[in-house]
Structure formats: structure tokens, C-alpha cells
Image: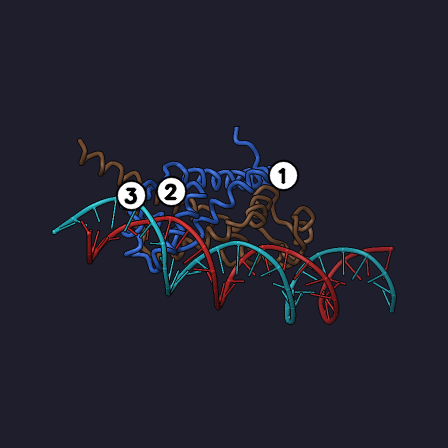
Chain colours: A brown, B blue, C cyan, D red
Amino acid sequence: MNRPLTAAKVRDAAPLFAALGDPTRLGLVVRLSSSGPRSIARLSETAQVSRQAVTKHLQVLEDAGLVRGFRRGRQHIWEIEPGRLGVARDYLQRIDAQWDAALSRLKTIVE
Amino acid sequence: MNRPLTAAKVRDAAPLFAALGDPTRLGLVVRLSSSGPRSIARLSETAQVSRQAVTKHLQVLEDAGLVRGFRRGRQHIWEIEPGRLGVARDYLQRIDAQWDAALSRLKTIVE
DNA sequence: TATATGTGCAACCAGGAGGTTGCATAATGG
DNA sequence: CCATTATGCAACCTCCTGGTTGCACATATA
């Protein structure tokens, strides 16, 4: 039915984009998506910041529902939460659709 | 060709998501997409913050390439920069594609 | 049992983000 | 010409974010 984007939906979606809006976090998402589940130690090797900073970023991503973690022995493994990126993509799609609708309305008036 | 997501691309895309990551700004984008070009005064009427705050947010969105403004008489009109949201969507699509590829690789190994 | 490895927790800090107010200036409309 | 409207600019403030370091604790491993 493609409902209009309510203010409530906006408040719901913004944190998702905010989580993706940091280069280090976006890098983590890309990394986990391409290479699969990784421990914090592993992820910290390539990241430009400290292990603790990586940990904080992963928690932010978790709060946004983008990743999830579990323990295996002494290590904490993180992996992508599948489907969550699709939510963000759908949201952008919605906005674009509104834009297209507005355009065609304008066209109708002009013609 | 669908190239891999380089670190450079990550640095390029993060500001785009960051710009969308604030509820007020995301609201402005939605508003401009659905209702078309609007002056600052108009946009401020419905926003929950002051006119000056709205101005600042619009500048952030402009820096991210998401909107553009022009003057008409004494008013400053802002409108959506078409196609820029598509860039963000494509980026998410890429990450998802990497994820799918990683999944199918895993499947191949298991079988 | 020592030792090395992987994490978690807490304190702390600098800088930027998001917000406000106050004032100056430019364009419209009687 | 005067009042109103729309905006820009600048200063200022508070709080959150992203980062660090130090230390404690749990788990492997020789």
C-alpha cells in the first residue's frame, strides 16, 4: 500500500542512518558483510582505532540492529544482522517514490 | 562491474548517511521530496526547532549533496537534489551483494 | 600453574553537533 | 518612505560522540 512517511517513521529510521554515518562503523559493516563473522581482536587489527573504540562502535551498530554478537570461548564474535540494511534501503526507496509522485503531479498540472 | 567497496568509497559514503542520520534533517528531506521546493520560513513552520537551526541543517544537507538552494526575491528556496538518494541506496545494495556473495561462498564450501 | 590472549568496565578528555538569542540587512507592499 | 517579512551572520552554550588509557577478569595454552 506504500503508506506516507509519517513523523514516527522518520524518528525510527534516523538512528539507522546515524549508525551508518561514521566511517569506522560503515567500514565494520562492509568488513563483516564481505568477510563474515569476526572477533573484536580480528576487527581491530585492520581498524585505525583502538580495540575499545571498535567495541563501542559495535555496540552502536547493535543498538541500531545492524549486527549481533555472541561469545565463543574467550572471544566475542560479531556478525551482520541480515535484512536490516534492506530496511534502510526500503526507506530511501520510499522517499524516492514520493519524489517521483510529486514530479508527476507537477507534470500533470503543467500539461 | 560492481567493484569491491574500497576504504575510499567508505569515506565517501559515510557523510551521506551521517547527513540523513538526524531526525530533523531526515524530516526535511522527506518534506522536500513530497511537497516540493520550499522556503526556509515555510520549512520552519512545521519543524520543531528555530529557523536558524533549520538553516544549519539545510546547509549540512547541501554539503552532502542532498539538497540545493537558490534565491527568489527575498526568500531562499530549497529543493531536493535528484539522484543523490539513489547513490546511498546503491551503496547499501553493494554491501548486501557482498553479503549474499559471502553466503553463497559459504554454502559452496559446506555442500 | 604460569603465561599469553581476548574482553569488559570505568574514568577521563577534546571537539564538534545541535540548539539558542540578538542584531544587521535585503526585499516587498501599502 | 515606513513597516513587515525573510534571511544571514555571529556569539554563545550544553551535551554527546569518538577517542584514549589503565586495570581487572576470564579463557587458552605450554
Specify which label sits upstream in the sequence, 1 or 3.
3
- What residue is pinned by disc 1? B109
Which of the 4 image quadrants contains residue A92? top left
Mark number for residue B6? none
Judge left or right: residue B111 versus residue A92: right
Quadrant where the image shows the C terminus of chain B: top right
Q: Which residue is mark 2?
A: B67
Q: What element does badge 2 sit on?
A: strand
Disc 3 marks which residue? Answer: B37
Category of crowding for the residue at label 1, using alpha-carbon neighbours closer than 10 angstroms: few (below 14), some (14–19), many (at least 20): few
* Residue A10 can be seen in this image: no
Q: Confirm whether circles 2 and 3 share one chain.
A: yes
Give left or right: position of C30 versus D29: left
Q: CA distance from mark 2 to mark 3?
A: 10 Å
Q: Residue at x 59, y 49 (%)?
A: A24
- Crowding at dot 2, Cα within 10 Å, few <14 / some 14-19 / many 20+, comes out as many
* SS type, badge 3: loop
Q: Is label 2 in contact with label 3 (beta carbons under 8 Å)?
A: no
Crowdedness near tag 3: few (<14), some (14–19) or many (≥20) residues, C-alpha within 10 Å:
some
Q: Are marks 1 and 2 on the same chain?
A: yes
Please tell me whether mark 1 or mark 2 is closer to you in this view: 2
